[in-house]
Image (tube, rainbow, N blue to C red):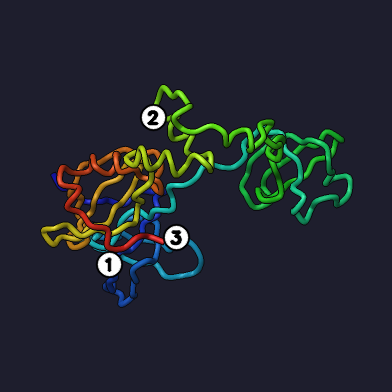
Amino acid sequence: MSKAIKPQKGIVYECYKGFTDFNGDRCRAGQKFVYWDDYGPNGYLMDKASGRGIDIVISKDKFAAHFCPAAEQTETKPKFKVGDRVRIDKNSDWYDQGNSNPINIDGVITDFIDEDLGIMVNWSNGETNSYNERDLILVGAEQESYIDDNQLKQYSMKAIVVSSLEQIKELAQVSFLKDQIESEFPELFVKHKVGNRYKHSDGNRYILTGENSSVALTNLKTGMIESSTVRVDNFNKITVDEFSELCRDYKELTLIKERQ
């Protein structure tokens, strides 16, 4: 059964079909907004997701025909967390800039306010300072593998015993095994991502939308969800296996525009 998309606080929505609101303000395809508040009994007030810009008002009954959850909010766990041991990255502007920005000693993240100079670090020399995420590296992140690449390359996929599909996916991260593994297990690897657009053999066009770790096919004309809702691990790395769960006739869908 089709369901209308309703805006929620904390979710970024992308306009996939442009329109002009009753104030005469233009909302263009590709612009991103967040739900701010109800606008009277029949409308939603949408605020620009980032940067300067005007608010947009959309009728509640037309919201799903113009907006879908934006793909990029699917990413991303912070690179660091409180308690991590770190050092200053050699490429940082703060590298070797006095005792409060020491090199070659470890520090511990004590607070995480935000990524813009909001990562607090206590250094083992007694100093404390704050940094941007790009200024720091995890201790051990630059360590090299103790296995020589030439030794690894004498092995092949057929010589490795695996006991789960997850192990196969992990092995595919090894550069010289990747092509072989993906050719043998194509159903396990990335083929789709949120934001892609598809045309069904019956003429209907869809956009693959995602929210709360689940994806579905939204009809571009009606704004209604017309598939099963499928839980996935990553909105930007949706496997053929996961995609096939959306609908029985998924093979009738042809990719017509890939999200960049």
- Can residue 40 be seen here? The reply is no
Query: Where's the N terminus, which quadrant?
Result: top left
Residue 239, position as x, y percentages in the image:
34, 43
- Can residue 26 be seen here? The reply is yes
Marks 2 and 3, Cα distance to the nearest angstrom?
Answer: 38 Å
Residue 132, position as x, y percentages in the image:
68, 50
Marks 1 and 2, Cα distance to the nearest angstrom?
Answer: 39 Å
Quadrant in which residue 234 is drawn: top left
Question: What element does badge 2 sit on?
Answer: helix
Lateral position of residue 124 relative to residue 115, left or right: right
Residue 202, labelled with which disc?
Answer: none
Looking at the image, is 163 positioned above or below residue 119?
above
Residue 165, labelled with which disc?
Answer: 2
Give the residue furthest to the bottom.
24
Residue 4, position as x, y percentages in the image:
21, 51
Marks 1 and 3, Cα distance to the nearest angstrom?
Answer: 17 Å
Lateral position of residue 126 relative to residue 152, left or right: right
Residue 44, position as x, y percentages in the image:
30, 59
Please tell me which of labels 2 and 3 falls first in the chain. Answer: 3
Q: Residue at x 27, y 44 (%)?
A: 243
Q: Residue at x 41, y 61 (%)?
A: 260
Relative depth, front residue between 14 and 179: 179
> Which residue does the numbered mark 1 point to in the structure image?
17
Question: What element does badge 1 sit on?
Answer: loop
How many marks the image carries: the answer is 3
> Which residue does the numbered mark 3 point to in the structure image?
49
Pointer 2 with pointer 3, Cβ within 8 A = no
Tag 1: residue type? Lys
Judge depth for marks 1 and 2 and give the one in front. Answer: 2
Tag 3: residue type? Ala
Relative depth, front residue between 10 and 98: 98
